[in-house]
Image (cartoon, rainbow, N blue to C red):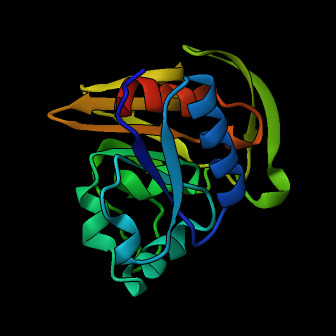
Amino acid sequence: MRKKKIRIGILAFQGGVAEHKEASLQALKNLKQDGEVVLIRSRKDIKNLDALILPGGESTVFYKLVLNAGIFQELKKIKNIFGTCAGAIFIAKNIKNKIKGQKSLEVMDMEVDRNAYGAQGESFEENIETKLGKINAVFIRAPKIKKVGKNVTILAGNKKNIIACEERGKGRNYLATCFHPELSTTKFHEYFIKNLVL
């Protein structure tokens, strides 16, 4: 791996922050890559980030939390972003069924349907095939990726049911999953670091 130490930030307002931190640290270790994982809560935390992870949580309050922290524009400038569940909604260019005032970073060329899999009680686990191998995927009030742009590659699912995808180009790279990889595997964190960040 790259000799240079990398700095990965995790937006730390809601969702599986601790789980993402643990998965990221384990991924760095598995890749034998020197790096640190920091929690992002304010503008000063964003300095010198190589990548950002957006955990799940409540997609409708993401924008308010980020706006209140004064970091919305700064997040848009980060070149490598990995969004899981609500985090995937927050990087999408288009959101279906959004509530009034709900905004996203609008950086990844996809349309996402918020809470398409239903309420929390309808959450489920499923073994899925991905380009990274078979994994156990945990879906919690999951969104559905309805459409993607021509530069977006599907990593799990198919055109009618996209579960994970990536977009690379012009020095900006994005990874999105409808499920919560941090709860069952480090494969997606390793993939993000190795293929999109380094």
Q: Is residue 27 above or below residue 129?
A: below
Q: Nearer the viewer, residue 50 or 63?
A: 50
Q: Is residue 120 left or right of residue 47?
A: right
Q: Position of residue 62 (x, y in %)?
A: 49, 71
Q: Is residue 132 above or below residue 151?
A: above
Residue lying farthest to the bottom in this orientation: 68
Specify the quadrant that holds the N terminus: top left
Q: Is residue 41 left or right of residue 81?
A: right
Instruction: Report whether residue 41 is seen.
Output: yes
Q: Is residue 121 left or right of residue 177?
A: right
Instruction: Report whether residue 158 is seen.
Output: no
Q: Position of residue 180 (x, y in %)?
A: 67, 43
Residue lying farthest to the left in this orientation: 170
Q: Position of residue 148 (x, y in %)?
A: 34, 34
Hey, which quadrant is residue 102 in on the image? bottom left
Q: Residue at x 82, y 42 (%)?
A: 124
Marks counted in the figure total 0
Hey, which quadrant is residue 125 in on the image? top right
Q: Residue at x 73, y 22 (%)?
A: 135
Specify the quadrant that holds the C terminus: top left
Q: Nearer the viewer, residue 119 or 35?
A: 35
Q: Residue at x 35, y 54 (%)?
A: 49
Q: Is residue 35 left or right of residue 26?
A: left
Q: Position of residue 108 (x, y in %)?
A: 31, 44
Q: Is residue 197 above or below residue 141?
A: above
